[in-house]
Image (cartoon, helix red, strand yellow):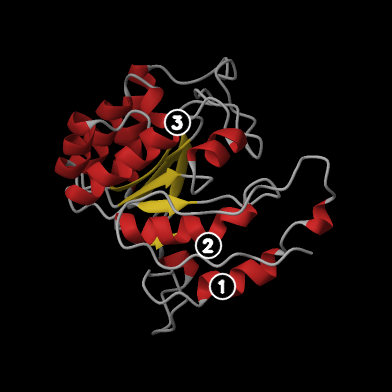
Amino acid sequence: SEPIQTIAPAQGVQQPKTVAPAPLDKPVWETPKLEDVSEQVMAQPYIRFTESCSGPEGAPVDEYAAPLFLAWQLTNRCSARCLACCEESGPDRAWRDELGASEALALADAIAAAGIPYVAFGGGEPLGVDHAWGIFERLAGRGVAIKLETDGSRIDAAAADRLAELAVDCVQISVDGATAATHERVRPGSSHASAIGAIERLVARRLEPQLVFVPTRLNVHEIVAAFDLAAALGCSAFV
C-alpha cells in the first residue's frame, strides 16, 4: 500500500496539504489502514481526547431517581445526503410523526421535571426545526445541560450568540474532510466552509466545539490533516 503522508501541525487556519483520495474503483485494502493512521493521530500532543477515568464508586443504579442522559432526535430531515449516515437522514427523510412545537415543549418540561440532567440533540439537523430554540431555552432555563450535534450550516453569528447565552455544554460539528472537496464528496449537500465558519464563531465565544470526523475509505487519507485543522481552529476534541 502507499505510505501515509504525515502533515506537520498547522500554524494557522489554513487548508492543509493532503494526498489524493483513493479512486472509487480501488479495493478497500489498498487504502491506508485505520490502525496505522490512528497511531499518527494519537501521537499528536496538542488536542484533548476523552479518556476513561477512575474514581470513587458511584451510587447503585436503584438509587438514581431519573436517567442520567437522554438522546432526542427532533427530526430526521437535513440538507445533506451523507454517504456514511447511520440514520439514513436527508432532505426528504422527515418522519411522519415528528413532534410539533407544543408537544416538544411539553416533553421538554417533562424531562426537566423528571430530573434528567443531560439531553443530546442529533438528527437529522436539529437546528432545522423551527421550535428547537424554544426547547433549548426551556431546558437550559431549568438547569438541564445540552449537547448539540450539527453540520454547522445554521450557526451564524446570531445563533452562536444564542448558544453562548444558553451555555450549551457541548457542540459537535461534523467535518468529514480536511479539504472542501473531500468533505463535500462524503457529505453531498453539506458545506465545508459553513462547518469551519461555525467552529470559528463558537471558538470565538469560548464554547469549545468538537470536530467530528467519520473515517471511510474516501476520506481516511485526510484524517491526520483534519486532526491538525481541528487543533488549529481551537477545537476541544477530535472525535
Q: CA distance from mark 2 to mark 1?
A: 7 Å
Which residue, given by chain and number where applicable, does mark 3 sit on? 191
What residue do we see at 31% from left, 26% from top?
105
Residue topped by disc 2:
224
> Where is residue 80 shown, x and y percent of the image?
54, 26
Crowd class of label 2 (few under 14; some 14 to 19; many from 20; radius 10 Å): many
Residue 202 image position (x, y, % from top left): 25, 45
Percent x, y of residue 131: 31, 21
SS for callout 1: helix
The image's mark for residue 143 is none
Q: For the N terminus, which image quadrant?
A: bottom right
Label 3, residues with CA under 10 Å away: few <14, some 14-19, many ≥20: many
Along the polypeptide, which appears first: circle 2 or circle 3? 3
Q: Where's residue 112, x and y in %?
A: 29, 42
Amino acid type for the residue under numbered disc 1: Gln
* Quarter of image, res 132: top left
- The earlier-in-sequence mark between 3 and 1 is 1
Name the image quarter holding residue 10.
Answer: bottom left
Residue type at mark 3 is: Ser
Q: Is residue 213 left or right of residue 3?
A: left
**Is residue 171 left or right of 29 when viewed as pictured?**
left
At label 2, the amino acid type is: Val
Q: Is residue 23 above or below residue 153?
A: below
Total numbered circles: 3
Q: Which residue is mark 1?
A: 40
Element type at mark 3: loop
Q: Nearer the viewer, residue 162 or 107?
A: 162
Residue at 66% across, 35% down: 83
Q: Gap in Å between the C-alphas at discs 3 and 1? A: 27 Å
Residue 181 seen from this side: yes
Query: Earlier along the polypeptide chain: callout 2 or callout 1?
Result: 1
What residue do we see at 49% from left, 44% from top? 179
